[in-house]
Image (tube, helix red, strand yellow):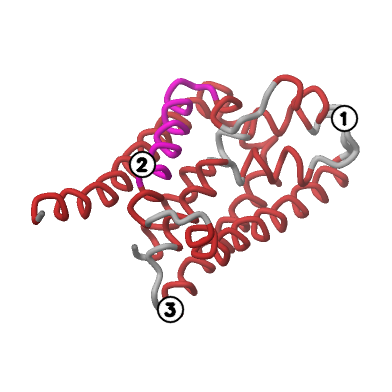
C-alpha cells in the first residue's frame, strides 16, 4: 500500500472531521488556551497509540497464533462496522463512546487521552487497520511510509481540532454530517478490500487442495 493510499484510509477511518461536534461538546467548559493544550496532547497520544500497535502488530499475531489472512478479515469487519456507523451518522457508536463516557468527559479536567485520543480518534477501526497493515510490512521503507502517514495524521488532527469552532461555524452540523458519510463510503471500501485480501489466499489454497 502506497503512502497516499494508506494515509487516505487511515484519515478516513479516524475521521477527525466527524469528531468535531463531539469534541466541541466535550471541551465547552475549557478556556481556549486549555482547549489548544488538550488538542496538542491528544495528537501526541494518537501517534503513541498507533505506533505502539504498528510495532507490536506482528508480535500480537504470533502470540495469539493469528494468521495474516485472519487478521485482515477481522480487521476488515471492524472497519466495515465503523463505516456503517459513519454512513448512519452515528459517530459515537462507531468509536465505542457510550453516554456514560461522554458524561464523565464533560466534567474531566483532562480529556486528551480518554476519550479524545482513545477511543475517539485511535479507536477499534484505526487500530485494526494498523495491525492488519503491519502484518504485511517487510522493508524498513514500508515502515517509514506508515510512520510518516501516522505523523501526518496527527498534524491533520491538530489543525482540524485547533480550528474546529471555525470549521463548525462554516460547515454546520449538516455539512460535517455530509462529509462524514463521504468518509464512511471510503472506509467501507477499505474494509471490503481488507476482507478480499484476506479471503483470496484462503480460496487459492482451497482450490489447489
For label 1, the crowd category at 10 Å Cα-Cα, with few meaning under 14, some 14 to 19 and many 20 or more, is some
Q: Which residues are magenta?
A: 73-90
Q: Which mark is residue 141?
A: 3
Q: Is residue 49 left or right of residue 78?
A: right
Q: Which mark is residue 29?
A: 1
Task: Identify the residue shown where x is 42% and y is 59%.
Answer: 133
Where disc 2 sits, the SS reads helix
Task: Identify the residue shown where x is 70% and y is 35%.
Answer: 165
| Quadrant where the N terminus is found in the figure | bottom left
Task: Identify the residue shown where x is 52% and y is 47%.
Answer: 126
For the stretch drawn in magenta, what is the main secondary structure?
Answer: helix
Residue 207 or residue 134, whichever sits in front: 207
Chain-order first, disc 2 or disc 1: 1
69 in relation to 118, above or below: below
Residue 204, given in percent of the width and then of the height, sits at 14, 54
Which residue position holds label 2? 191
Mark 1 and mark 3 in contact (Cβ < 8 Å)? no
Q: Is residue 144 magenta?
A: no
Name the quadrant containing residue 120. top right
Depth-wise, is mark 2 or mark 1 nearer the camera? Answer: 2
Where disc 1 sits, the SS reads loop
Residue 175 or residue 192, whichever sits in front: 192
Amino acid at each position: 500500500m502506497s503512502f497516499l493510499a494508506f494515509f487516505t484510509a487511515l484519515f478516513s477511518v479516524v475521521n477527525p472531521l466527524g469528531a468535531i461536534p463531539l469534541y466541541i461538546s466535550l471541551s465547552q467548559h475549557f478556556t481556549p488556551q486549555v482547549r489548544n493544550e488538550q488538542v496538542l496532547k491528544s495528537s501526541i497520544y494518537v501517534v503513541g497509540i498507533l505506533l505502539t500497535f504498528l510495532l507490536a502488530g506482528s508480535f500480537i499475531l504470533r502470540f495469539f497464533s493469528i494468521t495474516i489472512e485472519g487478521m485482515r478479515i477481522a480487521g476488515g469487519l471492524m472497519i466495515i462496522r465503523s463505516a456503517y456507523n459513519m454512513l448512519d451518522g452515528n459517530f459515537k457508536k462507531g468509536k465505542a463512546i457510550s453516554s456514560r463516557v461522554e458524561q464523565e468527559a464533560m466534567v474531566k479536567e483532562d480529556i486528551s487521552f480518554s476519550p479524545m485520543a482513545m477511543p475517539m480518534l485511535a479507536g477499534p477501526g484505526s487500530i485494526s487497520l494498523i495491525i492488519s497493515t503491519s502484518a504485511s510490512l517487510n522493508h524498513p521503507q514500508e515502515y517509514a511510509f506508515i510512520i510518516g502517514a501516522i505523523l501526518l495524521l496527527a498534524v491533520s488532527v491538530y489543525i482540524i481540532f485547533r480550528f474546529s469552532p471555525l470549521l463548525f461555524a462554516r460547515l454546520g452540523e449538516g455539512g460535517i454530517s455530509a462529509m462524514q458519510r463521504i468518509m464512511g463510503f471510503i472506509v467501507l471500501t477499505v474494509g471490503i478490500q481488507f476482507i478480499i485480501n484476506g479471503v483470496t489466499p484462503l480460496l487459492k489454497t482451497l482450490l489447489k487442495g
